[in-house]
Amino acid sequence: MSAPASLSLRALRKVFFAGTANEVVALGGIDLEVPAGQFVTIIGSNGAGKSTVLNAIAGTFPLTSGAVSIGEHDVTGQPEYMRSRLMGRVFQDPRAGTAPSMTIEENLALSLMRSHRSGLRRGVTNKRREVMRTDLARLGMGLEGRLKAQVNKLSGGQRQAMSLLMATIADPGLLLLDEHTAALDPKVAATIMGLTGTLVAERGLTALMVTHNMDLAIRYGDRLIMMHGGRVVLDVAGAEKETLTVKGLIEKFHEVAGEALAVDRMLLD
Amino acid sequence: MEFIFSNALEQGLLYCFMVLGVFITFRVLDFPDLTVDGSLPLGAGVTAAMIVAGHSPFAATAAGVAAGVLAGCTTGVLHLLLKSGGSDATNYGPKLLAGILTMTALYTINLRVMGRSNIPLLGVDGVYEKLAAALGISMINWNLILALAALTIVVKYILDWFLHTEFGLCLLATGDNEQMIRAMGTNTNLTRIVGLGIANGLVALSGALVAQQQGFADVGMGIGTIVAGLAGVIMGEVIFGVRNISWVLFSVIGGSIVYRLLIAVSLRLGIAPTDLKLLTAALVVVALSIPTIRSKVVRG
């Protein structure tokens, strides 16, 4: 099992549909150093590039330019599945993080064996079941008694709790959360968010959480980043973050967004 | 009547490896693989050609299976080339095309391997004759059925074991939620290729066993394999249930037998053998469309 990893993004650029009329600069040069164990929340409007940053780290698409390092590994040229061993990911759609027609124990076994190449050893062993029961019990959803239940029989909240557990159970160095509570009803979202805070703190994970919810972004994490138009426009940590309010953030947002609009107009003129 | 039943049982067991192969592609990998129409005669052709050339029928059968594995892997690699970077798991176009291409290419390869369109195996010993000689019994009727049943159980348990290994779980997850298992660090391109290889190896095993049982390999014997396989899979799932993977492997084998029983009864009722493919296709259409129709009706 690995210790939390630092994350380093250097001059990340991603241009979609380059050279066509639909060209979009999704990431316009992102520099970000995240020390090991830091919990960063990322906010911004639609199209700001929040999810694109996470996908760039995960390797979902090749970068236009720039470099990504996790710990001492430069993963820039690595395919998605290879660098996946270094990070856990949870997506917005609760169905995305689990295999629906497989059982709870089979899903968790998949996440427990992520740290090594899968071989011809038995996937679900009694030793792994022990680990699963202990970890499932901490979700407080009674799933530890339903190891052989198919995941598609679970509720959205239960599936997202499973996804979160699966992303963290093998102690990856890095956790990427892409609006992972946005599709849940408020009460369940609060439960999952609480669980996220506990897991990240307990396992000392380096975490990046994208959210639309400014309140969540302020309450959780050690550092807050606001993105706009593919750039980081605000980066606060420590004592300064403690004093942030939703109202203050919104003002800040309008300040930057308004500026961007003004620049656009100037360009048009 | 007993003859019809034992005959159907024999056919069902001969073809159950093919149905297991179709189950692995269609259900486990979510990959409707048309390669099977070519890998069945490939298994038969390679085996027959080698037996006629004087090789041991066991080695010949193993070579037939290996050829099937290779054919399946080829489809996997073609799919990789055709899917053009996109990783949308529900995009069936490249999957279907990869299978069609391999199937078509296999027609030529099968003719090359066999040297002609039909290889008779009369007067030469296949695995059944060798086994009969070794055991000192005749390999007909119930003895043959018992031998096939024993092989079926062995293959079933190997598959069952394999699908519960770490790699096997990754294979299951590749068809169930590819995005998720890739995020867990699995190379899903590799698991898919391996899965297609295993599936087509099983299909080729049926081809090899059928050829030796009926006494010839024919280049046209694979036509409609995918549909017959689907019929077996669906009937097995509907009749025997899908409780878990170990159970469903038995269900699918049962489905293969029930399907051959249905065919035997149809023939007995006077339906022309040439009409069976249309009937089978209709059966698959009905079975696959029931959920769609039911949901429409319920929605009103």
Image: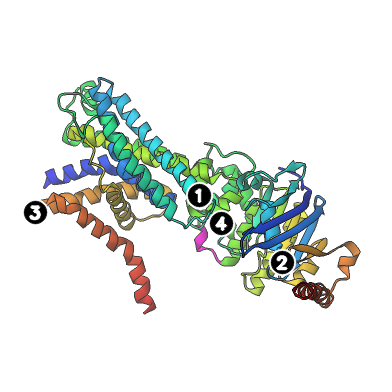
Helix, strand or loop at mark 4: loop
Determine which quarter of the picture holds residue A231: bottom right
Residue at the disc numbered 1: B174
Q: In this orientation, which residue lies closer to the viewer: A181 or B31? A: B31
**Alpha-carbon distance for marks 4 and 2?**
28 Å
Whether A151 is among the magenta residues is yes
**Alpha-carbon distance for marks 3 and 1?**
44 Å
Residue at the disc numbered 2: A48
Q: Amino acid at mark 4?
A: Thr
Residue at the disc numbered 3: B270
**Alpha-carbon distance for marks 3 and 2?**
70 Å
Q: Amino acid at mark 2?
A: Ala
Q: Nearer the viewer, mark 3 or mark 4?
A: 3
Q: Nearer the viewer, mark 1 or mark 2?
A: 2
Image quarter hosting the N terminus of chain A: top right
Determine which quarter of the picture holds residue A95: bottom right
Are tags 3 and 4 found on a single chain? no
Helix, strand or loop at mark 3: loop
In this view, B81 is above or below B207: below
- Measured from the top left, where is residue A218 in percent x and y? 80, 69
Dot 3 and dot 1 residues touching (CB under 8 Å):
no
Helix, strand or loop at mark 1: helix
- The magenta segment: A150-155
Dot 3 and dot 2 residues touching (CB under 8 Å):
no
Q: Residue at x 74, y 42 (%)?
A: A73
Q: Chain of mark 1?
A: B
Q: In this orientation, which residue lies closer to the viewer: A167 or A27? A: A27
- Measured from the top left, where is residue A180 in percent x and y? 65, 64
